[in-house]
Amino acid sequence: MKRNAIYQLCIGAMIAALYAVLTLSLPMLSYSAVQLRFSEALTVLPFLFPGAIPGLFLGCAIANIASTFGILDVVFGSLATLLAAVWTSKLKNPWLAPLPPVICNMVIIGAEIAWFETGLGPGFFAAWLWNGLTVGIGELAACYVLGMILLYVLGNIPALRRVIPAGRLALLRRPERAEHRA
C-alpha cells in the first residue's frame, strides 16, 4: 500500500471518529428539526482529502444510530453525507465546497423529517420545504462558517500539506495581486 493511501485511510478513520463524537456529544443540536451539527463542518474536507469521503459516511452512520428518526436516518442521513462528500471532492472552487452538504441535507434530511411529521399526506410538501429551510440554515452555519475556517486552516498546516494533493492545495491559495508580481 502506498504511503499516501495509508495517510488517506488514517485521515478517514480520524474523521469518522471525530464526526461521530462531535455529533453524539451535542444531541440537542444534532437531532432536532433545526439542526446545527458542528460535525457538518467536516463535510468540506473531501475538497482536500479523498480519504475523508468514507470517513464522513461511516462517522455519520455511527452518529445516526442515536437519532430519534431511527434506521431511516442511518440510511438516508448517511447517504446524504456520502453524496455530498463525493460531490464536494469533484469541485474546483474552495468557496463552493460547503454547498453540496447544504443542498443534499436540505433536500434529503428535509424530506426525511417531513415524512416523520406528516407521512406522505397533504402536508408533506409544505413540511418538506419548511424542514429543508431549517436544516439548510444549520448547514450553512456549520459548513460555510466553521467548514471554511477549517478548510483554510488545515491547508496551512505544514504536516498536512504533504498529504493534500498539490492541485487542491493550489486552489486554496489566493491569487497574487498584479502589483505584487515581479
Image (cartoon, rainbow, N blue to C red):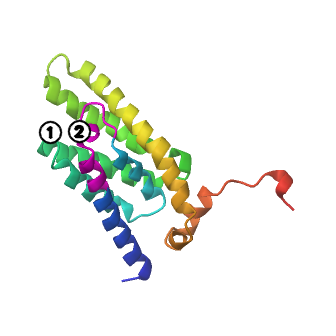
First in residue order: circle 2 vs circle 1: 2
Cα distance in 3D space between marks 2 and 1:
7 Å
Q: Give the residue furthest to the top.
A: 122
Which residue is the site of mark 1? 68
Q: Quadrant of the N terminus?
A: bottom left
The one nearer the camera, 68 or 21, is 21
- The number of discs equals 2
Magenta range is 19-36
Left or right of residue 170, residue 84 in this image: left
Left or right of residue 176, residue 147 in this image: left
Going by the numbered disc 1, the residue's amino acid type is Thr
Question: Is residue 25 a member of the stretch shown in magenta?
Answer: yes
Tell me the SS state at disc 1: loop
Q: Which residue is rendered at x = 44% and y = 56% of the image? A: 45
* x and y percentages locating residue 2 in the rendered image: 41, 82
Q: Which residue is rendered at x = 60% and y = 56% of the image? A: 172
Disc assigned to residue 31: 2
Q: Which residue is rendered at x = 29% and y = 45% of the image? A: 80
The one nearer the camera, 26 or 61, is 26
- Answer whether labels 2 and 1 touch (C-beta < 8 Å): yes
Say if residue 98 shows up in the picture: no
